[in-house]
Image: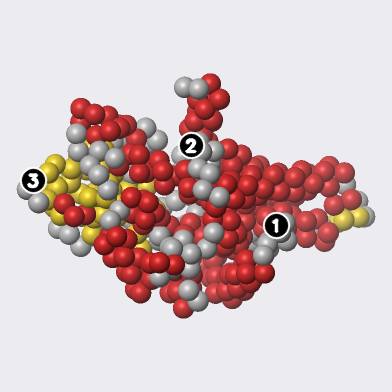
Amino acid sequence: MGQFYLMTDDQREIVDLVDKFCKKELDPIVAEYDRKGEFPMHVYEKAGELGFWGIGIPAEYGGLDVSCVTHALVKMTMGYHDAGYAASHDGATLGIKPILESGSEDQKHYVADRILNNGEFTCMCITEGHCGSDVSGIKTTAVREGDEYVLNGTKAFVTNGSLASMYTVLAVTDKTKGYKGMSLFLVERDIPGVIVGKDEDKMGFRLSNTTEVSFVDVRVPVKNLIGQEGMGFTYIMQTLNRTRPMSIASAIGLSQRALDYAVEYSKIRFAMGQPIYKNQGISFMLADMEIQIEAARQLMLYNCEMIDRDIIMRGRGSIPKAFAADMCMKVTTNALQVFGGYGYTKDYPMEKLMRDAKIFSIFEGPTQIQLKIIAELLTGK
């Protein structure tokens, strides 16, 4: 992994460490946990011993303080071994991102300490089942009563919903103001009225935990308001502008693994007296997969480099997100085709990779939403 990017010595060392860790701890149990549809918590706990809980948290709060590029390379490497695990591992710190951007110093230290010292999970509660990507349609409300807000509503498709001890929740505080009437809250899981639903039984990405989370008359202290009231939607968008390029890092890792499998299989599978890679139809398919993966990787790393230089442009992350999501599905489909009938069986790894690939065109903003954002930027809307 990583041979396709000019890494520094420090980046190479981190990537090699992650790769060795995943080969030892993750690869042997992926098939089992894919069948069970569970996140391997014991692997995450071992990752903490190597300091991997701190990736994405600034050094001033005790984290590793890696660059966006380094973070993406780490997630891409994890995704090579299992994209679902990579999503949940990385998602453990996703809920802290808007707090780091806009929260108080007390909130930043409080959440970072719990992640780094205890291996606790945070998660984002934004999506609701009735409105999907239309954030303006959310119905979860937060009504202020004295020194508390009372939250009511249900969030859907929450990554790490069953694992998290802290939720970053977007709720409506003023129905008359649209996007400007939404606020963001840090909600503890153990508060009365927080109800975690069943784990979703997904087609793929089965090592990543996904649940529904409901809030029934949940009383949240005013001090748990993140930033200013009415700024929640803005904070979420600011967070996504920084995290969206990295959201497809594991898709690129997954795609690279699919290509590696396809290339190796094409060398040992014979047809008409020769290995099938000598068939131009197969060799051109492999070459196209390489082109697609490399293009997606460079789009991602370029956008991460911009973030590291503090060049944050609204909607820029939609470009690698849209491209890589479609690329991943195309590459895994073609890689399975190289395996022929064997690729369609569970005895070979391709069917799992193809199942895992589909989610990237759906979660964290489906491809159609990314295209809408890009088109609006082009037309000045």
Q: Can residue 112 be seen in this view?
A: yes
Residue 163 placement (x, y as % from top left): 34, 62
Q: Is mark 3 on a helix, strand or loop?
A: strand
Residue hosting label 2: 314
Q: Which amino acid does label 1 sit on?
A: Tyr
Q: Which amino acid does label 2 sit on?
A: Arg
Structural distance between the alpha carbons of marks 3 and 1:
53 Å
Q: Can residue 342 be seen in this view?
A: no
Structural distance between the alpha carbons of marks 1 and 2:
25 Å
Taking depth in this image into account, of 240 and 83 the one nearest to the observer is: 240
Dot 2: few (<14), some (14–19), or many (≥20) neighbours within 10 Å?
some
Q: Quadrant of the N terminus?
A: bottom right
Taking depth in this image into account, of 28 and 174 the one nearest to the observer is: 174
Q: What residue type is labelled 3?
A: Glu
Residue hosting label 1: 5
Structural distance between the alpha carbons of marks 2 and 3:
35 Å
Residue hosting label 3: 145
Q: What element carries label 1?
A: loop
Q: Residue at x 29, y 60 (%)?
A: 105
Q: In this view, does 152 lie above or below 368?
A: below
